[in-house]
Image (tube, rainbow, N blue to C red):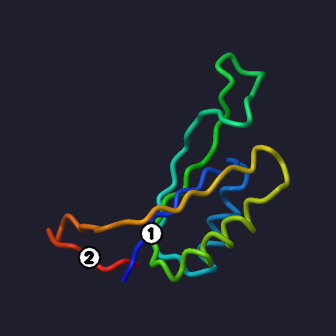
Amino acid sequence: MKCCKITAFIHINCLEAVEEALKTARVAEVVVSQVKGYGDYKNFYTKDWTSTQARIELFASHDDVDRIVSVIMGAAHTGLDTDGIIAVLPVETIYRIKDRAPMQCL
């Protein structure tokens, strides 16, 4: 089964709504972290132009990617420049450390 990694950078204020939407969509495993940076949007009110965002990372089967991306976009969309981005990357192998063996994609 082909596997992908989905990474989303979203507005920190949308994090709770995205987490709830992913739970409702039965996405089993998600990692969330707080990050800061700048890209198209620059926060000119801070000394270093950065803004704080949430990074959501998860692995999914290739067949589920479009559905999960739609869930994230639906919950994170506000129409502002700070809505964020989503990247989908192919994953060759995932290893579960406790088993010391490759695992099936979720």
SS for tag 2? loop
Q: Quadrant of the N terminus?
A: bottom left
Q: Position of residue 33 (x, y in %)?
A: 51, 48
Q: At label 1, which amino acid type do we have?
A: Cys
- As drawn, the residue found furthest toward the left would be 100
User: Label 2 vs label 1: CA separation?
Assistant: 13 Å
> Which of the 4 image quarters holds residue 42?
top right
**Foreground residue among 85 and 29:** 85
Estimate how packed mark 2 is, as few (under 14), some (14 to 19) or many (20 or more) residues with alpha carbons within 10 Å.
Answer: few
Question: Comparing marks 2 and 1, which lies closer to the viewer?
Answer: 1
Q: Position of residue 88 (x, y in %)?
A: 52, 62
Direction from residue 32 to residue 44 in the image, left or right: right
- As drawn, the residue found furthest toward the top would be 47
Direction from residue 97 to residue 58 in the image, left or right: right
SS for tag 1? strand
> In percent of the image, x 63 and y 69: which residue is there?
69
Estimate how packed mark 1 is, as few (under 14), some (14 to 19) or many (20 or more) residues with alpha carbons within 10 Å.
Answer: many
> Which of the 4 image quarters holds residue 90?
bottom left
Label 2 belongs to which residue?
103
Numbered label attached to residue 93: none
Direction from residue 103 to residue 86 in the image, left or right: right
**Foreground residue among 85 and 22:** 85
Q: At label 2, which amino acid type do we have?
A: Met
Label 1 belongs to which residue?
4
Q: How many marks?
A: 2
